[in-house]
Image (tube, helix red, strand yellow):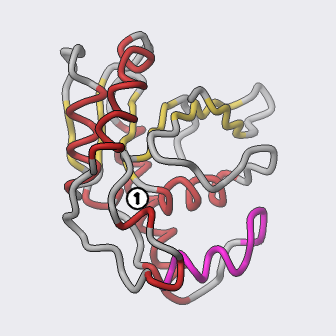
Amino acid sequence: MLKKEFYFIRHGQTDYNILPNEDKIDHPPHISINETGKEQAKAVEPLVANLPIHCVCASPLKRAQETKEIVTARLQIPHHVIDDLGECTSRIWLEMNRHGMYSPLPKEGEARAFIDRTRKGIYHALSLPGTPLIVAHGGVHWALCALFGITHHEWKLHNCGLVHFTVTDEETWIASRLA
């Protein structure tokens, strides 16, 4: 894995995000952010506008694309769609949460396949020149924290949560919440 800093933001709220867990079968792939999600994205946009980023990499899913357009409205930088940054299924999300934060990576199964796909997506983003902003999903954030062995950061990220991922001199990953 390439070790260079990047920024990550989870998409804005959708109507699906506010359902109780027992009502979540599978997140519709192309659901829009709701009015709250638009306001969340607008609120974090001034912070994003001042980040030292050189490109934006986003999930192809509608909620991530809509969030990306709002939070990068003032930026004149390249935008890249990376399919491997798409969200996991609800079944995988529940499996990851059952294992809990800071648990070892699964060795097989759907969660492992999702983590491997996320690894490919982040590698693609980090291969681009400069510092990227990644606009994706809560499951992708969870997978990144697991991949990087991050233990001093909450893996569950709220909608429009903004995180700065950096690497120490000892080559240890650190995640710092900015919003």
Q: Is residue 154 above or below residue 179?
A: below
Residue 158 at x, y = what percent? 54, 48
Residue 107 at x, y = what percent? 64, 83
Inspect the image, locate mark 1, and give the three-letter code of the amino acid beneath it.
Answer: Lys
- The region drawn magenta spans 91-104
Q: Quadrant of residue 147?
A: bottom right
Q: Is residue 17 magenta?
A: no
Residue 18 at x, y = what percent? 45, 63
Q: Residue at x 58, y 30 (%)?
A: 164
Residue 46 at x, y = what percent? 38, 14
Give the position of the C terminus as an image quadrant: top right
Q: Is residue 124 above or below residue 18?
A: above
Residue at the outermost bottom position: 109
Q: Quadrant of residue 75?
A: top left
Q: Is residue 143 left or right of residue 127?
A: right
Q: Is residue 93 magenta?
A: yes
Q: Is residue 135 above or below residue 129?
A: below
Q: Residue at x 20, y 33 (%)?
A: 69
Q: Which residue is mark 1?
A: 120
- Judged by its main secondary structure, the magenta piece is helix
Q: Residue at x 29, y 53 (%)?
A: 59
